[in-house]
Image: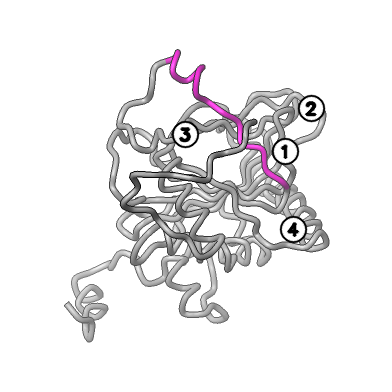
Amino acid sequence: MNNIPSKSYGILQQKKTKSVINEIAEQVVNVGYSILDAGYTAAELQSLSEEFDQIHRRYVKTYGESNLRNANEFHTIRSPLTQGKPFLDLALNEKLLSLIKKLIPGKFILNQQNGITNPPQEAYNQDAWHRDLPYQHFVSTKPLAVNALFCLDDFTYENGATFVLPASHKSEAFPSERYILNNAIQVEARAGSFIVLDCMMFHAGGYNKTKSARRAVNHLFNIPYFKQQINIPKNMESADLSDEAKDVLGFNYMEPASVSEYLSKRAGKAL
């Protein structure tokens, strides 16, 4: 590739970035995706990888392989953060939350965390184009939700790295077939990275042509007006959580069960 020009003229305004987090946020806002190094050591990543496999074995034993396959859920682990502390820590990763704060102004919560396996040479339930707010055809000036896909394994062209349609979070309709063929790209990323997407950008998992599974842990953060996929606070103990963790995990945004409970929560809050 030729050298990218560094000079310019006729420019009256230019954004300035003072940190890697700001640079990544700028790319997500403009193009719809970027890559964030989560900061794990090789040993920490190996431990997380082993925990993933252990949880998946327990998950299959609990819910039954035939039941999971009938529901097209065999390659997914729902809400692993409620089943293992390493995945709670992953959802609360300091670098990740710093980025989410840049992308979603004000309050946000974790809507869902799911373990995902892209099996070798086999179809799976994430290999179709979709938004992570599915069935929605609108755009917003600020992200309503942000997807952070943690790579437990390297994402490569050969093992089905995620396909994206850059900047499609800025258009309401799903683009034409010819447009997709001309503009879809695959995002390669190293194990230990988050692939961060505006949730309204169309994306899809690729076909894994290798002989090894490709594993990931998906996170969806959104403004608190959307309900969680699975009620996280009702499936966790809160005693050891920090105030920030409780906020991110949705403990402060549970629906009141009655008028009395609503009024009790409102007491002392500023309007």
Category of crowding for the residue at label 3, using alpha-carbon neighbours closer than 10 angstroms: few (below 14), some (14–19), many (at least 20): some
**Nearest to viewer (mark 3 / mark 1):** 3
Q: Residue at x 22, y 78 (%)?
A: 266
Whole-angstrom CA distance, mark 1 to mark 4, is 14 Å
Q: Position of residue 192 (x, y in %)?
A: 70, 53
Whole-angstrom CA distance, mark 2 to mark 3, is 26 Å
Residue 210: numbered disc:
2
Going from N to C along the chain, the mark reached first, 3 or 1, is 3
Residue that badge 1 annotates: 214
Q: Is residue 111 left or right of residue 116?
A: left
Highlighted range, magenta: 177-190
Q: Nearer the viewer, residue 139 or 60?
A: 139
> Quadrant location of the C terminus?
bottom left
Going from N to C along the chain, the mark reached first, 1 or 4, is 4
Going from N to C along the chain, the mark reached first, 2 or 3, is 3
Whole-angstrom CA distance, mark 3 to mark 1, is 23 Å
For badge 2, the amino acid type reads: Thr
Whole-angstrom CA distance, mark 4 to mark 2, is 22 Å
Q: Position of residue 61 (x, y in %)?
A: 71, 46
Q: Position of residue 49 (x, y in %)?
A: 76, 53
- Residue 67 can be seen, yes or no: no
For badge 1, the amino acid type reads: Arg
Residue that badge 4 annotates: 48
Category of crowding for the residue at label 4, using alpha-carbon neighbours closer than 10 angstroms: few (below 14), some (14–19), many (at least 20): some
Residue 233 position (above or below residue 15): below
Task: Find out whether the residues at labels 2 and 1 contact each other: C-beta distance under 8 Å.
Answer: yes
